[in-house]
Image (spheres, rainbow, N blue to C red):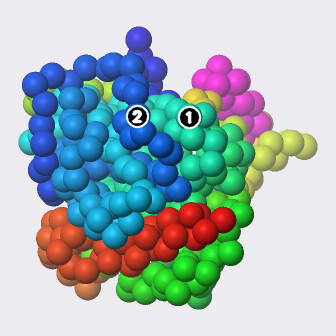
């Protein structure tokens, strides 16, 4: 199996640079793949069922699904206390690891860990929807858990998730690696601070809630996700300077490195170096193949490099394990066509191509300028503290109020 084949095609993307900053929660004796456990549903179905996905190091396959621990537990426990007759909750037990290097987390690469969380989340939502037809579902995710939850929400919003969008009351994300660059707190709704009502409700209680968390610059270290039909019912909350969700805009190499690290087993330094080397070479090769296939125009004895996307974007896409691998054979044939065309008229074509590629190289450097800008880097002097302090900095309060309001609106149907 090649290095590229080992790159998990899951909904997972990455948080390499600060994964070790995740607050450590409960661990487990073993970390093995297992079928989804039955969701703990009390006698009688609630108005609102809240599913939580913890961050790196805060869960395990053997974690108690009813234990209100970690950042996510710090949000959900007050909701349960405020509306005990209306709300039930459980937490997705999964490896919550980063290649075996984060205390409390499992041994799997980050991308595999997120994929496991997503699979368990899908199964749990399906079971709740089938068991309790009138119950609506809310989700809360933090850091690695926010990535699994954001992909869950994106697929549901696109009509390709495990349940329909009208079963989702709201999704609260904290330190989300998939936060879109410059995203407002309610993604896709600039200026909106009051979430949309849950489907089929008057929204009377929710209308009294405002998601007033301060906006953050930059975007998630993994990229960007949109929420389709769930737009307005997703809150994406990020502390400015938290590298996981507020990474610099012009830092493509950071994102490439993070995506590659997320696919590696990091427990053995020697093996890890070999794996990372193979993944990097595969990503570079795939990026160049995509450039050949998409960005060179050949015809009528002429060759031009007319990029549809810059080199930085091509590198980030190639490192992302969700994207399809370009056909190497087709790329090689296309390159042969390019070389033959240039060889037929080198005096004219080579200078033109050199100028076009030089401009692309200059743009690549510009797309990474924030990595050498001291003023930008100063924003991240306390990135570990910013990532770990969501439960103590007041960032969870609006989420608590929102979920309680959702429960009352749904019960009032």
Which of label 2 and label 1 is nearer to you?
1
From the image, tell me which residue sits under label 1. 131
Q: CA distance from mark 2 to mark 1?
A: 10 Å
Q: Residue furthest right?
A: 300
Q: Nearer the viewer, residue 32 or 267?
A: 32
Q: Quadrant of the N terminus?
A: top left
Please tell me whether residue 340 belongs to the stretch shown in magenta. Answer: yes
**For residue 84, above or below residue 376:** above
Q: Which residue is at a point 29% across and 49% down the rendered structure image?
A: 54
User: Does residue 333 appear in this view?
Assistant: yes
N-terminal-most mark, 2 or 1: 2
For residue 206, above or below residue 152: below
| Magenta-colored span | 327-342
**Crowd tier of the residue under label 1, counting other residues whose Cα lies within 10 Å: few below 14, some 14–19, many 20 or above:** few
Please tell me which residue is depicted at 12% across the width and 37% down the height of the picture: 27
Position of 91 with respect to 104 (left or right) is right
In-image side of 40 versus 206 (left or right): left
- Residue 292 image offset from top left, x and y in percent: 65, 39
In this view, the residue in front, 397 or 55, is 397
Vertical side of 40 occupied by 172: above or below: below
Residue 314 point in image, percent of width and height: 55, 49
Quarter holding the C terminus? bottom right
Q: Residue at x 38, y 86 (%)?
A: 214
Residue behind mark 2: 39
Query: Horizontally, is 385 left or right of 403 in the view?
Result: left
Whether residue 225 is visible here, answered yes or no, is: no
- Mark 2 surroundings within 10 Å by alpha-carbon count, few (fewer than 14), some (14 through 19), many (20 or more): many
Q: Residue furthest top?
A: 1
Q: Are marks 2 and 1 in contact (CB under 8 Å)?
A: yes
Please give the name of the residue rendered at 45% of the width and 59% of the height, measured from the top-left corner.
86
């Amino acid at each position: 199996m090649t290095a590229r084949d080992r790159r998990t095609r899951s909904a997972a993307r990455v948080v390499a640079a600060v994964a070790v900053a995740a607050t450590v929660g409960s661990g487990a004796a073993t970390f093995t793949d297992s079928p989804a456990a039955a969701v703990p549903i009390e006698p009688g179905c609630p108005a609102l069922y809240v599913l939580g996905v913890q961050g790196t190091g805060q869960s395990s396959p053997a974690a108690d699904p009813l234990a209100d621990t970690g950042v996510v537990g710090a949000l959900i426990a007050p909701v349960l206390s405020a509306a005990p007759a209306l709300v039930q909750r459980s937490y997705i037990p999964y490896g919550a690891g980063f290649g075996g290097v984060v205390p409390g987390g499992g041994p799997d690469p980050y991308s595999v860990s997120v994929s496991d969380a997503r699979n368990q989340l899908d199964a749990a939502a399906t079971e709740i929807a089938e068991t309790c037809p009138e119950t609506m579902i809310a989700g809360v995710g933090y850091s690695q858990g926010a990535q699994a939850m954001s992909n869950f929400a994106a697929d549901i919003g696109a009509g390709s998730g495990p349940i329909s969008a009208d079963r989702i009351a709201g999704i609260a994300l904290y330190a989300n690696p998939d936060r879109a660059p410059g995203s407002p707190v309610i993604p896709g709704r600039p200026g909106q601070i009051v979430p949309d009502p849950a489907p089929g409700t008057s929204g009377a209680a929710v209308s009294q809630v405002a998601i007033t968390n301060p906006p953050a610059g930059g975007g998630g270290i993994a990229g960007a996700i949109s929420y389709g039909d769930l737009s307005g019912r997703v809150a994406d909350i990020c502390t400015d300077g938290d590298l996981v969700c507020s990474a610099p805009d012009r830092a493509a190499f950071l994102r490439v490195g993070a995506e590659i690290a997320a696919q590696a087993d990091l427990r053995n330094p020697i093996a890890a170096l070999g794996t990372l080397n193979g993944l990097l070479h595969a990503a570079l090769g795939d990026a160049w193949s995509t450039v050949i296939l998409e960005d060179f125009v050949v015809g009528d004895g002429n060759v031009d490099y007319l990029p549809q996307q810059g080199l930085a974007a091509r590198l980030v896409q190639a490192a992302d394990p969700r994207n399809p691998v370009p056909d190497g054979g087709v790329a090689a044939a296309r390159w042969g066509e390019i070389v033959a065309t240039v060889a037929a008229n080198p005096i004219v074509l080579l200078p033109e191509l050199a100028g076009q590629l030089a401009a692309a190289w200059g743009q690549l450097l510009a797309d990474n300028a924030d990595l050498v800008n001291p003023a930008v880097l100063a924003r991240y002097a306390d990135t570990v503290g910013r990532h770990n302090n969501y439960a103590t900095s007041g960032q969870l309060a609006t989420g608590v109020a929102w979920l309680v309001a959702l429960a009352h609106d749904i019960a009032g149907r």
